[in-house]
Image: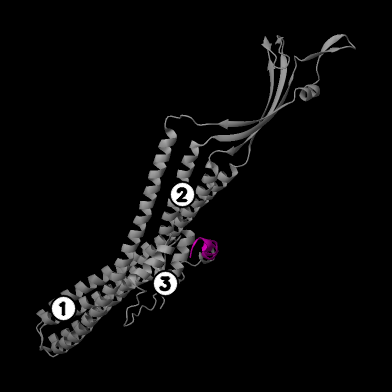
Amino acid sequence: MKRKSLLLLLMAGLLASFSYAQKAWTLEQCINHAFTNNIQIKQQMLLVESAKADLLQSKMDLLPGITGNASHSYNYGQTIDRYTNQFATSRVQSNNFYLQSGVTLFNGFQKMNLIKQNQINLMASEQDADKFLNDISINIATFYMQVLFYKELVQIRENQTDITRQQRQRMQKMVDAGSLAEGDLFTIDAQLAGEESALISAENDLEISLLTLSQLLDLPSTDGFDIVVPDLTISDEPAITGTPDQVYTYAREHMPEIKAAEFRLQSSERQLARAKGYYYPSLSLSGSWGTGYSGASKMFDSTNFALKTIPWSDQIKDNNNQTIGLYLTIPILNGWQTRTMVAKSKISVENSRLELDNQQLVLRKTIHQAWADARASFKNYKASEKKRDATREAFRYAEQKFDVGVMNSVDYNNAKKDMTNAESEVLQSKFDYIFKTTVLDFYMGKPLSLRN
């Protein structure tokens, strides 16, 4: 699920916001909710919008610039009137109106390269947002599986505690019958207390992991929050997608961190082209229009045989003036600034190229390591299953011997501890394998899911 789906997810999230505590959440629901409610994701999307604004502004810079001004003023004292070019000593009203427009015709393609650079920067920003969504997805999947791990661990601890309680009851009957020393009860009581403590610790870890996951989703309330427990049966054959090189080849073409690095390399190349544009002359076209009024402008009134101020409308028409011109600017010497700018841009290009190589190298290492770890964890899981089955049989045998008084409580407790440790190893290797194969599937473009 990427940016294009965020609007739909937002609507779904609003509809679901009234029943946070009344439902168990699937992994997909957790990820979708985070996409529409996580504050950091919203901030990342604002960076995309900012890049869009930069792109729009660079396109608008191609349009001519137009400025205008107007003034209304009074002069007191002696001054030279700009329209009569004569001294005026009395109060003189003046008005001025001015419009100017200019457009760059050529500047070494700097503006065009800036547009292309901002287009590339926007695409890089979008890939950064996708990378952030991927990171959030992986993070949620990690904590989701942690909750599942502790749920199963709590179940194991409960079963172990129940077995010990039942054994304690049988031992009490044997002590009451005189076939077992009362001191043996102390040993199993200590074991029961330890297992009850381990159960409480597992339950506390489960509550903390649920709280952490709910906080990651930015839920308004975490009361009653719980998740769906999917069927996590593991097949007899490793469900590992492709070979490491196949996974890497696909991921290199589709992972947003690689695309973002490629776009930043292209952006730095456009910046270099912009810097070289300062070597070229620039040509611009400019035009202006202006007019004004002066109270000192007089004309002879033949009717009254006296001077009178020329009417405002006549002056605005008579004082009208326009200019138009082409302006060529040739760079000759600017303190080596252009050469320095070009040199630094070349360094930036090389740095971006190295960053792309580094991102590809990191991705390759990550995938190869994850693939190897997934195979190793599968083998470890199968081996731990065999060990668990063997220790279960050994414990059943020890339990039978202990019930008839052939085995002492110390050997019995050791057999039970071996079974407990074996079950914990199976649980750990199981979730380690599931997580690594899920991540490999994610690198192959499959959505994060725990459904079989």
Using the rendered image of the protein, determine whether residue 77 is visible from the camera's viewpoint: no
Foreground tag (1 vs 3): 3
Q: Residues within 10 Å of mark 3 (few under 14, many from 20)?
A: some
Element type where label 2 sits in the image = helix
Q: What stretch is highlighted in magenta?
A: 1-13
Camera-near label (3 vs 2) is 2
Magenta span contains residue 11: yes
Mark 1: give few (<14), some (14-19) or many (20+) Cα within 10 Å. many
Vertical placement of 200 versus 104: above or below? below
Q: Residue 19 or 165: which is nearer the viewer?
A: 19
Tag count? 3
Mark 1 vs mark 3: which is more N-terminal?
Answer: 1
Residue type pointed to by label 2: Ser
Q: What residue is pinned by disc 3? A: 449
Q: Label 2 vs label 1: CA separation?
A: 71 Å
> Which label belongs to residue 267?
2
- Residue type of the residue flagged with mark 1: Ile
Task: Give how far apart the Cα atoms at labels 3 and 2 are.
Answer: 36 Å
Mark 1 and mark 3: Cα distance apart in space: 43 Å
Q: Describe residue 282's horizontal placement relative to residue 81 as left or right.
A: left
Q: Relative to 66, is 423 above or below?
A: below
Q: Where is residue 94? Give x, y as percent.
A: 71, 19
